[in-house]
Image (spheres, rainbow, N blue to C red):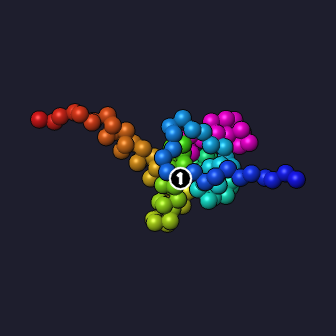
Amino acid sequence: MTHDIQPPALTGELLQDYCLTLHQLCHSAAVEPEFVLELVEYEVLEPQGERAVNWHFQAQDLARLQRAQRLIRDFELNLSGLALVMQLLDELCELRRTNKGVRLD
């Protein structure tokens, strides 16, 4: 008798180079694959691989997915609003990284 072994939910610290399949990502974030497909369509998530069955996500994509879930829940955003907010947050993060250490005396 074979048992279908489910990957454990990911918690705690994640390794930077760790990759997740679509199934593992969905299981870890407790979401349906259709939701992830929509996030990819709106460019909130960018998987590696050409087709959904071959997609792999970086560990930071799980954190990004969880952030997206919180934004949708807390601010009642639709997917296009979420995409815009995530883009602005990405730009803000990049600006902070670029300006780190720059003194304006």
Q: Which residues are magenta?
A: 44-58
Q: Looking at this view, name the residue that lies furthest to the front.
A: 1
Residue 6: tell me if it is visible.
yes
**Label 1 amino acid?**
Thr
Q: Looking at this view, name the residue that lies furthest to the left.
A: 105
**Foreground residue, 65 or 75?**
65
Task: Check disc 1 and report its element: helix, strand or loop.
Answer: loop
Residue found 61% across the figure and 54% down from its top: 9
Residue found 55% across the figure and 56% down from its top: 79
Residue found 68% across the figure and 54% down from its top: 33
Q: Main secondary structure of the magenta part?
A: loop
**Would you place residue 93 above or below residue 6 in this image?**
above
| Residue position marked by numbered label 1 in the rendering | 11
Q: Is residue 15 left or right of residue 57?
A: left
- Give the total of numbered labels: 1
Q: Looking at this view, name the residue that lies furthest to the right.
A: 1
Residue 54 placed where, x, y %? 71, 38
